Amino acid sequence: MRTRATLARSLVLAVGLPAATSGALQAQPLTEGDVPSRLQFNFGRAVAVDAAGGVHVAWLSGPTLDPANPGATLGQVFYRRSPDGGAHWEAPRPMTPTPFPFTGHPKVAAAGLHVYVVWHGVSEGTLRVFLAHSPDAGAHWEEPRLVSDNPGGVGTAWPSVAAWGDEVHVVWGDGRTGAAEIYLRSSPNGGHGWTPVRRVSCDDGRSSWTPSVAAEGATVHVAWSDSDTTPTPTAGPMTAAARARNVGKRSTTGAPPISAKPGRTRCASPPTRPGTLGRHGRRR
């Protein structure tokens, strides 16, 4: 499965053919009209396939300039599904009711017949992370749920989502400690109940952003970028360095054991040079 996004007028999906079938990929436009649609930042998936072969895509319609708020943009989250592997598509479904300032870039995950879409949007004057859940492969959707617990005035951004079985895991970045750090929240039952929010990245004064998450069985993996403040001959003091963490097996409540002690996160040393990938964490 391949996706191609455009900043022009439409979102295009290239439907993959079975390996034994010869022929070219079949590109299908998913959006219509004059409002630009796009995907942005490849740290999370905007397309997913469920256990029955249904295809699920989420995107941001817009953004367009907000005439009432100079410097802000209006965006609206949309979702569309194909129950038959891309042969036919149902009408796009708005996941947010109207275009709204600072609405941001949705990601999608599927496990079994569960489908999830996450995005960031403004609630009570603060950017927060929301999740919508469908228990039946996108046919019906529950009301969006607030996932992040960031305090007022501290915005969140760039969530990513992963699912396995009945469990779903959401990561995002926010600056509640000063520098931006990565946080994880998990649900063992399709988003109906949630574990406490856990910080994954180290509170070391380096900004961390654009997290990505994956789950397989009893293990959750989180990767992100953060700023390496060590100067190098070829780069300045704020060089992006990729990090990754295996946050270990989940407990019976679905909460990954990130902290060695309550309130403390076990941190490994930073990568030896900017651009390297450091794998650290622990397994219980």
Image (cartoon, rainbow, N blue to C red):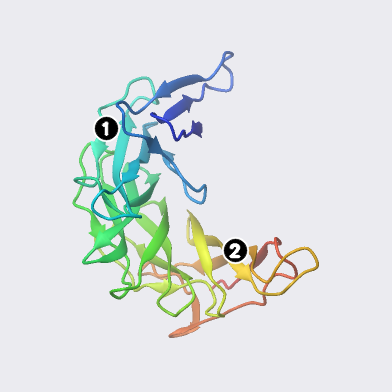
Q: Quadrant of residue 252?
A: bottom left
Residue in the foreground of this view, choosing between 224 and 48: 224
Residue 161 vertical position relative to residue 265 in the rendered view, above or below:
above
Q: Secondary structure at mark 1?
A: loop
Answer with mark 2 or mark 1, whichever residue precedes in sequence: 1
* Rendered location of residue 147, percent (x, y): 30, 63
Q: Residues within 10 Å of mark 1 (few under 14, many from 20)?
A: some
Amino acid at dot 2: Ala
Element class at badge 2 = strand
How many residues crowd mark 2 within 10 Å: few (<14), some (14–19), many (20+)? many
Can residue 149 be seen by looking at this rendering? yes
- Quarter of the figure with residue 71: bottom left
Residue at the image point whose x is 21% and y is 66% from the top: 124
Q: Seen from this angle, which residue lies furthest top?
A: 23
Residue 220 in view, yes or no: no
Task: Report the residue marked by disc 2.
Answer: 244
Amino acid at the residue labelled 1? Pro
Rounded to the nearest whole Å, what is the CA distance between mark 2 and mark 1? 35 Å
Where is mark 1, residue-wise? 92
Query: Residue 128, position in %: x, y?
Result: 31, 63
Which of the two discs, 2 and 1, sits closer to the camera? 1
